[in-house]
Amino acid sequence: MIQNSEISALLTLIDDPDEEVFSSVSSRIVNYGKIIIPNLENLWENTVSEAVQERIEMIIHRLHYSDLITDLTEWRDSAYHDLLFGAMLVARFQYPDLQTAPVIQEIEKIRQNVWLELNSFLTPLEQANVISSIVYNYYNLKGSEIGYQKPDDFFIHKVLQTRKGNTLSNGILYLVLAELLAIPVKAINIPKQFVLAFFNNDYDASSYDGHPQKKIHFYVDATTGQPFTHKDVDIYFKRINVPPVPSYFKPMNAVRVIQVLLEELARCFNDPKNMYKHDELLDLSDLLSA
């Protein structure tokens, strides 16, 4: 812990009943950065008032959130947008002390198991079957439709720990593995769905002028790992009465995928008590558009 007279004075004012005083005090504490967190944690442990503890928790959250803004901005501005790192940044919103090494190690174990079953003679469908066999059968990954009562289902480290995610988080895990294995799988922007598409090896989104769907072999449901066909997609578009325009079949880049993750996660925090988290997550999504 760091000690000086100003910090001591600020910490004693956290319980001030005047909201304006508390707002000013908390802003000055946040300006110290994360180095002041041990002081706040010590104060929390020695405080009996739940209201004061909640204020301390909010200040600590603001400190972590400020740090997350910095890291997410650096990720946005980097030359290469690593999808796994982006997903771990999102997880840090709720789990600021997340250790990245165990996540990377677990991903590498899964990648190695998939890689051992692959060879250069497999068709794209056979590659998809190998991935599904390892990830959904051997590792027993389970999936569900996106629901907003379980925010943990959105976090990549929790998916790896519990072997359970939703369509979006399972899909991100699938995309990370496919990229590590140099398999051309991309998320596409089909309305109200998070769909993975196996593209032709020669497809280049920046130069191809035709309908992207013509370069897609088939699709994968990330909930279960099961493939489905162009006919299935056509039926879906007819059911929702939307024309299947080319933009729906263009690959989403890593930045857009993380934006979708942030936007969907925000919907888990719509109750009045957590509305600030909802707004912060949308602000982080907007940050990626800047």
Image (cartoon, rainbow, N blue to C red):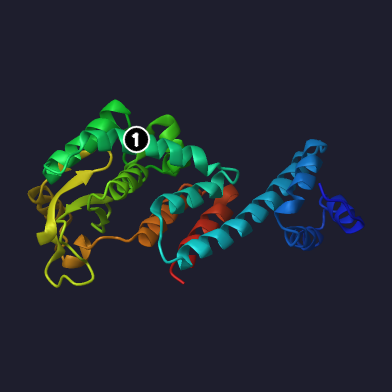
**Closer to us: 123 or 233:** 123
SS under mark 1: helix
Residue matched to label 1:
110
Residue 10, placed above or below residue 104: below
Residue at the image position 33 percent from the left and 32 percent from the top: 141
- x%, y% of residue 131? 24, 37
- x%, y% of residue 23? 75, 61
Residue at the image position 76 percent from the left and 59 percent from the top: 32
Which residue extends farthest left?
231
Residue 134, placed above or below residue 252: above
Q: Residues within 10 Å of mark 1 (few under 14, many from 20)?
A: some
Q: Is residue 220 left or right of residue 3?
A: left
Which residue extends farthest right?
5
Q: Is residue 52 left or right of residue 225?
A: right
Identify residue type, mark 1: Ile
Residue at the image position 60 percent from the left and 48 percent from the top: 273
Q: How many marks?
A: 1
**Closer to us: 277 or 184:** 184
Residue 129, placed above or below residue 172: above
Residue at the image position 43 percent from the left and 42 percent from the top: 156
Residue 2 seen in render: yes
Residue 290, placed above or below residue 72: below
Which quadrant holds residue 79?
bottom left
Residue 224 seen in render: no
- x%, y% of residue 174? 30, 44
- x%, y% of residue 262? 44, 55
Which quadrant holds residue 25?
bottom right
**Closer to us: 134 or 142:** 134
